[in-house]
Amino acid sequence: MMRAIIFFVVSLLTFEASSQDSVLVQVTILSKTEQETVQNVIATIKIGGTTLYKSTNMKGQFSFKARQGSSLEFKLSHAQFASSTEIKRMAKNASDTVAYTFEMEFLKTKELNEIVVAAPGVAVRVYKSNRLHVADFELQNDGNILLLTYPKRLQKGSELIIFDGTKDLVNFQVPDKANELIRDFRGNPHVVCNEMVYGIHYDGSTVGISQVPKNYYTTYIAPIVDTNQSIMYFSNFNPDYPAFDYYKFDQIDSSYQKIMQIEDELMMELYRSEYKWVDVRTKLWAKQMEIDTGIDAEIYVGANYFTQSLYYKEVYAPLFQRNDSLFLFDYYKDKLFTFDKLGTVIDSVEIYHHYNPKSTGWEKKLIQDRSTGQIYAIFERSGFTFLGLIDTKTGEIKEQVKLKHRYVDKVAVRDNSVYYIYREFESTQKRMLWKEGLPYKFRNAKTPSGDPIEASSN
C-alpha cells in the first residue's frame, strides 16, 4: 500500500513538472504576396524524435503543445503554394504560449494570368434596337431568347420580347415594375417584379402569363435545383445564415435525405459572436425569441445585426447536374464533390481557383452551358471578363477565355457560345445582346432545365 502511495505521488509530481514545461505553440500561415491567411496547409512538424501532422483551419492556423527549449522543424506544403521548411527553437524559459507566423509563396497567380486564349471569330450583335435597351435575357430550351427590355428606365416601364435570333416573335408589356429574369426547375422563365413573380408561357403562337406571390416563389419553388425522374434536389439556403444543406426528395416513397452540409466556419463564428457586443435590451429580446421558438439567441442577433455589416458575406456553393452526375462546389472545404443521381458521393477533388481573388479577379460566380453541361468560372481583370473551363475530373482550370469587350453584363453560355449584354464604350448606343464563340466543341448533354442554386446575390 505504501509503495502505491509513493508511486502515485512521484507520478503526480512528474505530471506537474511536465505540465509546467509544456508550451502551446500557435502557428499562422500567410500568403507572402497578399498577406492573407492560407487554409488547408499541410504541416509536418518534427519535435526531437516525434513527428506531428497538422493542417491549417479556416483562419489559416493550427496549434500543438511542446516542451520548453524544444527544437521545431516545420515542413509546409500546399497545392497552390511553394513548399517551405522553417526551423525554430523555443527558449528554455518560454511563456505558456508561443506564436509563429510563416509566409508561403503563391505559385499559380502567374500561371492563371498567362494561360489565356481569345474567343475565336468576332463579337456579333444578336439583338439591337434604336428604341429599347436590353436589361436581362434568358436562353430558352427551344432556341428562342426571352429579352427584358426598357426604353429609358427599367422601373419606369419594361417590355418582354421573345426573339428567335432574327426577328421578334412576341412583344408585350410587363404588368408590374420588373427587376430581372429567372427560370424555375422546369425551365419555365419568370420575370421578377417588386411584389409578384410572373411566369411566361409561350406555345409557338400565343403567350400566357401567370402570377405567383414573390414570397411563395422564393420559399417553395426557387430552392428546387432539378428533378431526376422521381428524385428532386433542393436546398434550405437562407441569405441571412452562413450555412445551409442540400437534400434529395424521393417522390415515390416521400423520403428525405441530406446530401451535404455547407458552412462558412469563419463567418459562422463571427455571426454568433455578434451577440456579445449588442446592448442588453437586444440580448433580452433575443433570449425571449429563443424561449418562444427554440432557436438560439445568437442566431437572432446575427441575422438581424451582423448581416447588415460590411463583414458579412453570403454562402456560395452552387450545385450543377450533367447527365447522371451532380457537381457540388464547396469553397469552404476547397472541394468539388461528385455525386451520382441518388445523391451518393462518388468522388472529390481539390479546387483552388477561388484563392487570391484580388489578383485573379475571381467573381464568385459559376455558370453552366445549358446544352453541353460544361461549367465555367467567371473572372474579371481590368474590366475584361474571362471564362475558365473547369475540369470536373481534376478540379483545375487549365486556361481562360478572354471576351472581346470590357464591362459586360449578364454572361450566359449555350452551344459552346457565350452571350452577354454590352453597350459600346463611351457611346450613346443602347445596351445590346452580343455573342461570341468559345474555342470548344463539346457535345450536348443532359442538364437541369432551371437555374442552379447560386447561393449568393453577389
Image (cartoon, rainbow, N blue to C red):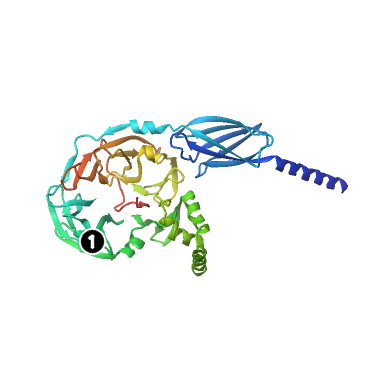
Q: Is residue 128 left or right of residue 416?
A: left
Kind of residue at badge 1: Lys
Tally the marks: 1
**Residue 377 image-quadrant placement:** top left
Q: Is residue 209 visible?
A: yes
Considering depth in this image, is 396 or 180 the residue closer to the camera?
180
Q: Residue at x 86, y 45 (%)?
A: 3
Q: Residue at x 33, y 58 (%)?
A: 222
At which x and y percent is residue 57? 52, 43
Q: Residue at x 36, y 62 (%)?
A: 219
Q: Is residue 296 visible?
A: no
At which x and y percent is residue 280? 52, 64
Considering depth in this image, is 425 or 315 the residue closer to the camera?
425
Relative to 65, is 228 above or below?
below
At which x and y percent is residue 314? 40, 52
Relative to 216, is 76 above or below?
above
**Residue 373 image-quadrant placement:** top left
Q: Is residue 204 left or right of residue 29?
A: left
Q: Which residue is mark 1?
A: 177
Considering depth in this image, is 121 or 450 the residue closer to the camera?
121
Q: Residue furthest front?
A: 279
Relative to 374, is 267 above or below?
below
Q: Residues within 10 Å of mark 1 (few under 14, many from 20)?
A: some
Q: Is residue 214 left or right of residue 172?
A: right
Q: Residue furthest right?
A: 2
Q: Residue at x 26, y 35 (%)?
A: 439
Label 1 sits on a secondary structure element that is loop
At which x and y percent is residue 134? 19, 51
